[in-house]
Every structure is written in structure tokens, then in C-alpha cells.
Image (spheres, rainbow, N blue to C red):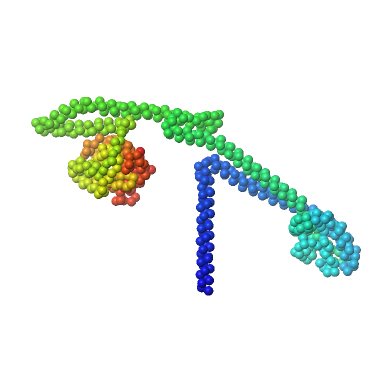
């Protein structure tokens, strides 16, 4: 007994598993079939309008067709029932007259008269769909029913004989010519010897054929109307969507730099007005872009020319300043201090000219990348060593977290060192005397360096501004490093030249962190970074996401 129960349970479990597997397969197949339609629905306004029109018109036409078919069938049945009622009344009167001469139901002529009445009132052969008349005498057991067929149900007979009222039913019967619907009506007929029941059976073949024809006509008309509405909606939508698609393609070409692209204008309707307005907008944009490009070109040319022209006088001033600086011990203290300040400002001015020349090369597109396999560990250490005097002067401790093995990447070591020098120098300057953390990470496709300080941090949206030229978070702060204000801008261009990312995160009171991410192999495309941009010690709620959609800046090539 127990084994039987276990076998039944096992069979049930297998059946459920099979049904579940079948359902999953059907769901996957349905998803595969529906995926193209879903994609088309999302991407095509034309398809959506036509589909909605077809569905709405199908529902409307279907409801109208159902209403027409139902009402027409009801009208045909009411008309037939009215005619049958009139005929039944006339036949009942005729039968009553024929049977009124008899006062005794046992008279042999009564049965014969019943047969004659049924024969005289019947119209046509039942196999050919003719009307049938039947007579019964439920109160007189000696009288046999005349032409009673299965079409007359027992329920109808009880209703007519017992209740004494006119009754109607629709019944289906096959008299040899195929199943046919009949309208069966019955009425009591009073006689001298009691009550007899007269039944009148009218075939509904003509009415049924008429109803079928009406339904077919309505269905065909509805299908034709739905198709016509679908075609019309497709044509009208095409007329509206086509200019929009042309405008989208033209806008894409404009965004790709083909500023001479325009839309064709046909007619004077709203779509023509749209095309003309779009063309006017494109013309204005082209004019403004050309003007801005010319201004930018003149600005770059001016910056480059000024930087080059200042080289010669700067060299002369530098020679004189070096001579004065060398002999400063023989001057008065005030003059000696002036010589020192002059030397420091000349150093800063020379750095500014160098940065301006570098920026002008980036703007002109002449910057070149000299990539070679480089171990980044000594590069990071060299940057820290060169900024050791600055960190000691600011009272900032620099902490390094680096792998023990070499970190090799195809980079331009001069540009990477310049980026790190700018990042570490800024972190030390803004560190408020707190430690600065530098981390180096690597994975299969990218290397990353993060520089973290714990200074005043950055306010929301300032992460978008730190790489702007000559931008300062606090203009009132004195520069400890004598920077030019172009360091992060040049670092940004150097990272972009490598095909890498230079990103910034900051929060008020929590400091800031910069992350440099470069591909291991020159020319590869970055997809991720081995180090997080938001530091682990950031307070939740103040951290800012590293993507450009929020208040951080990401630069990609």
C-alpha cells in the first residue's frame, strides 16, 4: 500500500515537472516570437498608429456587426412569430368550427375529423420544409394524437394542455432533408366534448438563410472597412512620419558635422513649414558654429603667437634676473627680497608660457602620443619624491598603496608623470595638512591611479568645473606651488590622448579624489576601472556617482 502511494506521488511529481518544463518552453518560444514585434512597437511610430487603428476599428466594427446581426435575427423571428400567431388563430377557429358539432368524444367521427383537420391545415411536405399542423386531446384518452412529431416537446404540450395558454418554442429536427429549425406554437381549442390542442410548426429555413446572409454581408463589410481604415491610417501616418524621419536623419548628419544638409520643402502646409523652420534653424546653427570656429581658431592662433613672441623677451629678462638673483647678497635686504620674488614670478611665468604652448598644441590637434611599455610603479614614486619638499612645507604625509609586482602599460611616461604631478600637487596644496593617499591598481585591460585628499572637498557641481582652464575652487586661496591654473586642463587632454578617463569626486568636508584610468594596451577601449572613484571612507548620502550624468566628470577618448 505504501509503495503504491509513493509510486503515485512520484508519477504526480514527474507530471508536474513535465508540465512546468512545457510551460517554460512555451513561454520562451512566445518571448522569442514576440520580441521582434515588441522591438518594432517601440521603434516605429508608424507601426503603433496602424496597429492601434486596426485594433480599435476591429473592436468597433465587431460590436456593430454583432448588434446588426442580433437585431436583424430578432426582427426576422418577431415577424415570423407574428405571422405564425395570426395563422394559428385562424387554424384554431377553423378547427373549433369543425369540432363544434360533436358533443361526445367517443363518437367515431371525431377521430376522423381530427385527421381531416390536420390534413387540410398542413402546408407542404415536412421533408421539403412545409408547415405542419398537429392535434392532440390530452383530456380524452380515447382520441389518438394526429401528426405529433418529436418537434413538439413534452414541456410545450403540458403548457398548452394544462395551462390553457398559447405557447411558443424553437426546436431543431431532421425530417429527412437535414436539420431544420422550426417555430412551434400551440394553442388550446375548446369543443363541445372538451379541449383539444392545436400545434403549428413553421420551418425557419428562409429566415435562417436570410440571417446567415446578413451576418456574412456584415462580416465582409466589416473586414473590408477595417482593411480600408488600416490602409488609410498607414498612408496618413506615412505622410506625417516621413518628414519627421527625414528631419531625424538630417539632424544626425548635422550632428556628424555635415552642416550643409537641409530638408526638401514641398508645398505650403504644416509639414512644409516644419521643413522650412528646420532648414532655417540649421542655417543659423551653421552660421554660429562657423563663427565660433573662426573665433576659436583666432584665439588659438593668438595664444600660440603670443606665447612664442614672449619667449625672446622672457629669455632676456631671465638672464638679467638670474644675474640680479646671483648678486642679491650684496644688495640691501629689501632689494634682495625683491630679487627673490622676481625670480619666483619669472619661474611661474615661464611655466605659464610652457603650459599655454602645450594647450595650443592640443587645440590645434598637433599633440602626439609616444606610447611605450612602462612600469608605472617607479613613475608614481618619482612623482612623490619630486614633490617631497612641497609636502614637507605643507605638513602633508603622502601614503602609497601599490602592488609589489611591476605594473606595465603602453603609455607615454612623460605625459603620465605630468598628470600625476598635477594631481598629487593639487592634493597636497588642498589637503589642509591631512594625509594624501595614492593607490595604484591594475587588471587585465586597464591601470588606474587614485589620489585622495581629506581637505575641504568640492561642492556639488564643482566636479564639472575642476578641469576648466584657470578655474579655482577658492579664488582667495594662495597658491603654494605657483601653479598656472592649466594643470588639470592639460592632464585632461593627456588622459584623452591615451584613450583613458580622468574623473573627479568630492564632497564638502570629506575631501576629494581623482582617478586616472588608462588602457593597458594603447588603442584599446576602456569599459571599467580597477579602482573605485568614490572612496570607501566617504559618508553615505554625500557621495556622488562617478558617471557624467551626476555631479562628477568623466572624460573618455
Pick the residue in front: 62 or 404: 404
Pick the residue in front: 353 or 278: 353
Pick the residue in front: 339 or 5: 5
Tell me how many marks there are: 0
Q: Residue most toward the front?
A: 373
Residue at x 53%, y 54% (from the top left corner): 26
x and y, in percent, of residue 48 in the image: 54, 43
Pick the residue in front: 174 or 239: 174
From where the camera sits, is residue 459 visible?
Answer: no
x and y, in percent, of residue 155 in the image: 75, 64
Vertical placement of residue 199 versus 422, above or below: below
- 83 left or right of 315 in image: right
Q: Quadrant of residue 495?
A: top left
Residue at x 27%, y 31% (from the top left corner): 357
Residue at x 34%, y 29% (from the top left corner): 296
- 305 left or right of 184 in image: left
Residue at x 51%, y 50% (from the top left corner): 31
Q: Quadrant of residue 94?
A: bottom right
x and y, in percent, of residue 10 in the image: 51, 66
Q: Residue most toward the bottom?
A: 1
Q: Quadrant of residue 410?
A: top left
x and y, in percent, of residue 258 in the image: 43, 31
From where the camera sits, is residue 58 visible?
Answer: yes
- 145 left or right of 318 in image: right
Amino acid at each position: 500500500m505504501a509503495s503504491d502511494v509513493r509510486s503515485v506521488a512520484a508519477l504526480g511529481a514527474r507530471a508536474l515537472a513535465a508540465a512546468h518544463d512545457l510551460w517554460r518552453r512555451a513561454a520562451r518560444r512566445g518571448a522569442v516570437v514576440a520580441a521582434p514585434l515588441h522591438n518594432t512597437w517601440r521603434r516605429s511610430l508608424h507601426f503603433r498608429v496602424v496597429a492601434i487603428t486596426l485594433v480599435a476599428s476591429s473592436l468597433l466594427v465587431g460590436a456593430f456587426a454583432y448588434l446588426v446581426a442580433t437585431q436583424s435575427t430578432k426582427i426576422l423571428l418577431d415577424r415570423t412569430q407574428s405571422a405564425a400567431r395570426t395563422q394559428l388563430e385562424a387554424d384554431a377557429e377553423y378547427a373549433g368550427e369543425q369540432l363544434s358539432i360533436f358533443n361526445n368524444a367517443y363518437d367515431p367521427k371525431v377521430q376522423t375529423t381530427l385527421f381531416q383537420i390536420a390534413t387540410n391545415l398542413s402546408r407542404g411536405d415536412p421533408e421539403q420544409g412545409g408547415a405542419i399542423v398537429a392535434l392532440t386531446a390530452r383530456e380524452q384518452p380515447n382520441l389518438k394524437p394526429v401528426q405529433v412529431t418529436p418537434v413538439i416537446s413534452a414541456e410545450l404540450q403540458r403548457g398548452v394542455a394544462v395551462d390553457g395558454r398559447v405557447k411558443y418554442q424553437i426546436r431543431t429536427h431532421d425530417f429527412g432533408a437535414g436539420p431544420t429549425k422550426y417555430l412551434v406554437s400551440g394553442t388550446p381549442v375548446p369543443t363541445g366534448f372538451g379541449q383539444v390542442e392545436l400545434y403549428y410548426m413553421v420551418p425557419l429555413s428562409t429566415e435562417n438563410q436570410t440571417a446567415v446572409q446578413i451576418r456574412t454581408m456584415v462580416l465582409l463589410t466589416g473586414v473590408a472597412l477595417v482593411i480600408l481604415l488600416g490602409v488609410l491610417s498607414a498612408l496618413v501616418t506615412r505622410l506625417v512620419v516621413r518628414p519627421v524621419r527625414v528631419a531625424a536623419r538630417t539632424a544626425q548628419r548635422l550632428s556628424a558635422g555635415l552642416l550643409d544638409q537641409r530638408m526638401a520643402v514641398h508645398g505650403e502646409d504644416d509639414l512644409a513649414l516644419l521643413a522650412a523652420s528646420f532648414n532655417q534653424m540649421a542655417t543659423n546653427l551653421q552660421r554660429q558654429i562657423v563663427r565660433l570656429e573662426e573665433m576659436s581658431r583666432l584665439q588659438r592662433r593668438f595664444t600660440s603667437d603670443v606665447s612664442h613672441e614672449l619667449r625672446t623677451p622672457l629669455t632676456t629678462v631671465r638672464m638679467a634676473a638670474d644675474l640680479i638673483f646671483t648678486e642679491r647678497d650684496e644688495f640691501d635686504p629689501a632689494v634682495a627680497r625683491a630679487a627673490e620674488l622676481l625670480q619666483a614670478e619669472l619661474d611661474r611665468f615661464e611655466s605659464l608660457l610652457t603650459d599655454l604652448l602645450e594647450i595650443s598644441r592640443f587645440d590645434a590637434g598637433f599633440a602626439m602620443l609616444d606610447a611605450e611599455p612602462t612600469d608605472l610603479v617607479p613613475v608614481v614614486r618619482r612623482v612623490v619624491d619630486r614633490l617631497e619638499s612641497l609636502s614637507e612645507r605643507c605638513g602633508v604625509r603622502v601614503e602609497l598603496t601599490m602592488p609589489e609586482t611591476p605594473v606595465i602599460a603602453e603609455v607615454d611616461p612623460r605625459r603620465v608623470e605630468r598628470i600625476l604631478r598635477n594631481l598629487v600637487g593639487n592634493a597636497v596644496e588642498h589637503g589642509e595638512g591631512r594625509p594624501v593617499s595614492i593607490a595604484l591598481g591594475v587588471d587585465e585591460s586597464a591601470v588606474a591611479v587614485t589620489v585622495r585628499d581629506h581637505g575641504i572637498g568640492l561642492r556639488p557641481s564643482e566636479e564639472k568645473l575642476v578641469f576648466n582652464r584657470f578655474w579655482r575652487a577658492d579664488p582667495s586661496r594662495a597658491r603654494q606651488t605657483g601653479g598656472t591654473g592649466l594643470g588639470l586642463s592639460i592632464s585632461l587632454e593627456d588622459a584623452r590622448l591615451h584613450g583613458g578617463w580622468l574623473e573627479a569626486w568630492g564632497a564638502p568636508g570629506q575631501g576629494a579624489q581623482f582617478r586616472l584610468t588608462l588602457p593597458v594596451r594603447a588603442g584599446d577601449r576602456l569599459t571599467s576601472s580597477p579602482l573605485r572613484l568614490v572612496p570607501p571612507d566617504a559618508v553615505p548620502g554625500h557621495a556622488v556617482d562617478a558617471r557624467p550624468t551626476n555631479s562628477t566628470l568623466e572624460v573618455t577618448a
